[in-house]
Image (tube, rainbow, N blue to C red):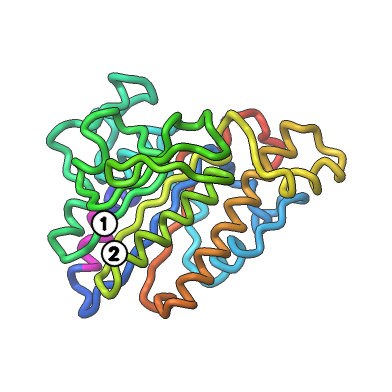
Amino acid sequence: MKTFHFLPFLLFCFILAASEKPNIIFILTDDQGYGDVNAHGHPYLKTPHTNKLRSESVSFDNFYVSPSCSPTRAALLTGMHEFRSGVTHTIIPRQQLHKDAVLLPQLLKTGGYKTGFIGKWHLGNKPGPEKRGFDWCSTNVGGPLKHFDATFIRNKKRMETKGFREDVFFDEAMTFIRECKDEPFFCYLATYSPHTPLAAPEKFIIPFREAGLNDTHATYLAMIENIDYNLGRLLKFLKDTNREKDTIIIMVNDNGVTEGLDIYN
């Protein structure tokens, strides 16, 4: 538990000590179980990009998180136990970060980093991420309810998008990274997938239906394969823009599976 909660502080110390500042991409998926990755033995999922990242990385297979969404998010960004950060639940007012909590992006900015937030915040409505250390913010209107053609707000400006929401999240992450040019960056990308309500592009659902899975299970797994697809796009982008060797990627889930699809967890 102590190791987990000191993670942001240790990461910050490591970066300050480095002669060259690495870029950092932190990907947080929502309600994805430990067993919901092909590398952990799932019999249906194909997650080649996640598998590749895992094989080239340090894998923490036994660490502790809070049992629900917002407290874990707060702990990852502050290094604080939920009773200190103020975030003890997923509902207002118990998802509200303490006003004096110092977040990882605030610390990284003192080290010369550009900081970007994309996706799900879920740490109180105000102040939002733009007031908690993030220079660049993009999220969708309607939270988890709008899966396709969602309205987004990027840096306080509304924009209409086409396609699946998580595809746009990864597009936005690449836009932020591109705009950073040669400056070191911290990109916090928090998906809604595979949290309910469930939906995914049909091409990801069809193979699971054809394997005999019901629509709920098929769609849940399709959302995970879509994340893997987008991870592959991101990794290719980093390689194509010569950022691959200068970038640390951290990928984690908030609290494990909650929707009852736990036969592999």
Q: Which residue is rendered at x = 64% and y = 47% of the image? A: 36
Q: Which residue is rendered at x = 74% and y = 43% of the image? A: 205
Between residues 153 and 182, which one lies in front from this camera angle?
Answer: 153
Between residues 75 and 180, which one lies in front from this camera angle?
Answer: 180
Q: Tell me where residue 244 sits by quadrant.
A: bottom left
Instruction: Judge whether residue 13 is colored magenta.
Output: yes
Q: Give residue 1's position: percent from left, percent from top.
A: 35, 44
Q: Which residue is rendered at x = 63% and y = 44% of the image? A: 223
Label 2 or label 1, whichever comes before in sequence order: 1
Instruction: Determine contact: label 2, label 1, CB under 8 Å.
Output: yes
Numbered label attached to residue 115: 1
Between residues 47 and 40, which one lies in front from this camera angle?
Answer: 47
**Distance from Cα at disc 2 to Cα at disc 1:** 6 Å
Taking the image as drawn, is residue 66 in sight? yes
As drawn, 48 above or below 92: below
Q: Give residue 12's position: percent from left, percent from top.
A: 22, 60
In this picture, residue 125 sits left or right of residue 211: left
**Principal secondary structure, stretch drawn in magenta:** helix
In this picture, residue 225 sits left or right of residue 206: left
Q: Give residue 213's position: percent from left, percent from top.
A: 82, 37
Q: Tell me where residue 10 sits by quadrant.
A: bottom left
Numbered label attached to residue 224: none
- What's the magenta region? 9-15
As drawn, 113 above or below 153: below
* Local secondary structure at mark 1: strand
In this picture, residue 252 sits left or right of residue 246: right
